[in-house]
Amino acid sequence: MKFTILATVVSTLLIAASSVEAHVTANPSAGVSGSYFQSNFRVPHGCDGNSTDMVIVEIPKGVTSVKPRALYPWNTAINMVALDTPITTSTGVINTTVGSVTWSNGLILDSMYEDFGLQFKLPVMEGPLYWRVYQHCVNNAWNNWTAIPDSTGKTTGEPAAVINVANATTSTTTPSDNTTSSSGKTSAAISFSQALGFGHVVFVGAGALLMAMI
């Protein structure tokens, strides 16, 4: 009897733990304002049992110096978008920035997970920094991890990944409205059809459109 109760409790805890990680997460998920940072966006499952064959991570506004981790044999496409305000440096004017990164032509079974790594510089801010992630599966289904909590803290839909940003001298965070893409526009940021070749990194120019996600 005691063994049965213990087994039930353990089973319940395992189910609860798996449900907590049933969405795309950033690992690690806490960084210092204005610092260089590396995080992996973890895709923990497929689409209703179907394998994942493409992942798109949209870069939040203010995040710069973005470099994706090459993931063999996936193709990697770096989509460049126009900056709202060009940046003048000692070597010239910067007019574009990374708007999104796409990994395609790979495969993750529903029974497995994968990490998609990015290196970048965090913006000067405090609070949650939300990352919209789009997951495509072999059955042509999408999991759009894009939902942001409302003013009450409630999230409707599939939650976006989040990195909590704090000053080096503080350990608490405050809310931030930094939820738009780096182009300041909608999520129409990338054309994954331009990610051609096997295991290549492709740069896609500003103005490319993201395939409609249904």
Image (spheres, grey):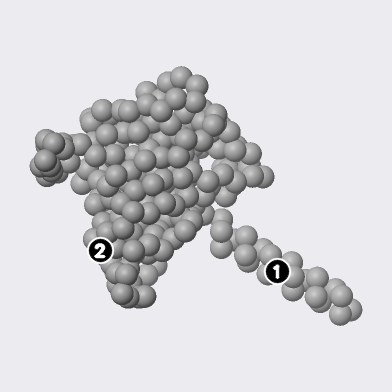
How packed mark 1 is, by other alpha carbons closer than 10 Å (few <14, some 14-19, many 20 or more), is: few
Going 27% across and 47% down the picture, which residue do you hit?
Answer: 64
Q: Quadrant of the N terminus?
A: bottom right
How packed mark 2 is, by other alpha carbons closer than 10 Å (few <14, some 14-19, many 20 or more), is: many
Residue 147 appears in the rendering = no
Residue 137 position in % (x across, y down): 53, 36
Work out whether 94 lies above or below 30: above
Q: Which mark is residue 125?
A: 2
Horizontally, residue 162 falls left or right of residue 24, namely left
Classify residue 69 by image quadrant. Answer: top left
Question: In front: 76, or 45?
Answer: 76
Residue 166 position in % (x across, y down): 32, 68
Residue 103 position in % (x across, y down): 46, 34
Horizontally, residue 14 falls left or right of residue 210, namely right
Classify residue 5 by image quadrant. Answer: bottom right
Cα separation between marks 2 and 1: 39 Å
Residue 205 position in % (x across, y down): 26, 28
Horizontally, residue 194 falls left or right of residue 54, namely left
Q: Amino acid at mark 1?
A: Thr
Q: Residue furthest bottom?
A: 2
Question: On the image, numbered disc 1 is attached to which residue?
Answer: 12
Q: Amino acid at mark 2?
A: Met
Work out whether 181 lies above or below 138: below
Horizontally, residue 207 falls left or right of residue 3, namely left
Question: In front: 113, or 146?
Answer: 113
